[in-house]
Amino acid sequence: MHFSRFVPVVALSAVIVFQAGVASHWRGTGIVSARTLLPVSDGNNWPDATNTGMPAGLVPTIYTGPNVITVAGTVIENKIINTYIEVRAKSVTIRNSRIDFDGWHPIYAHEGADGLTVERCTITGHGKTGGSYGIDTSDISGSTLIGNNIAGYENGITPGSNAVIKGNHIHDLQAGGADPHYDGIQLGGHPKVQTNVLIENNTIIGRDNADVWITNDFGSINGIKVNHNQLLGKASGTGPNVSLPVFTVYVDGAKPNGTISGITITNNVIQRGVYGFIDIDSASNVTGSGNVDPFASPI
């Protein structure tokens, strides 16, 4: 990223529209650190450790099934899973389970395994594997990822097309390797085009790169809704994960692999990253409205 190219955009309380081919960002005036975050005005509880992941009170059993799921409609429920799950069948559900795996993808959906649901799972890595994802559904369509608690990987979630990502708590990202690239939710246009993704009501506590990362690394992206999320960094405390994103939301269509259009960024609570709240570069029809910082000031 070439920060010297970026020119400020005046943040308005009305809808903000970004022009194609113009680099722009919302910088803001300061970095939020130790103050208490305000609740959203509608009174909803944000996803956190108390309301995401494997529900309390369950009596799970150790998972002894296969690593590779080949039967359509398989349901894995109320399990402790100490390995990876590779999904190669349609309409598989993984629910109310705890997955402890420090490899590259604890949950990976192979091409053609459309319709995967991952719901109320605690997915934990140990911060050792570079390039890792808590949930990787980038090769499929129609994934539903709801209420999961994801930590200890380089990236939280990477979806494919027609995906719903709601109510997840993504935090404490950590990975080995020389140059980790931390993203809470990552969209790269994979495999050729990525469309119709809803990112809503999640809490993402990111670091070093972006909470929501949208680029045309592999293909075109359109129809992405980033609505009513809490997008933060960990600006105080102790440990290796104390860091802010560079830009909290990052949209960059500068690569020659397709276009980015039809992105809406609305009604989010966004903590300022090191260089700003939101960065837009070489993308068309990107709009934003109703976004505030953690103290309810418009951005």
Image (cartoon, rainbow, N blue to C red):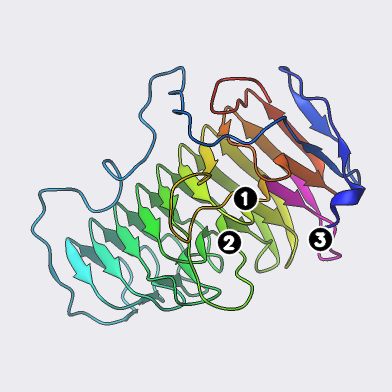
Q: Residue at 68% of width from left, 51% of height from top?
A: 246
Q: Are marks 1 and 2 in contact (CB under 8 Å)?
A: yes
Q: Amino acid at mark 1?
A: Pro
- Under circle 2, the secondary element is loop
Q: Would you say the residues marked 3 and 2 are in contact, meaning their CB atoms lie under 8 Å apart?
A: no
Q: Nearer the viewer, mark 3 or mark 2?
A: 2
Q: Which mark is residue 222?
A: none
**Kind of residue indicated by mark 3:** Gly
Residue drawn 49% across the image and 47% down it: 205
User: Which residue position holds label 3?
Assistant: 258
* Image mark for residue 182: 2
- Decide which of tag 1 and tag 2 comes sooner along the chain: 2
The percent position of residue 69, horizontal first and vertical second, equals 33, 77
Report which quarter residue 62 is drawn in: bottom left
Q: Position of residue 163 (x, y in %)?
A: 51, 52
Kind of residue indicated by mark 2: Tyr
Could you say which disc has been placed on residue 245 in the image?
1
Of labels 3 and 2, earlier in sequence is 2
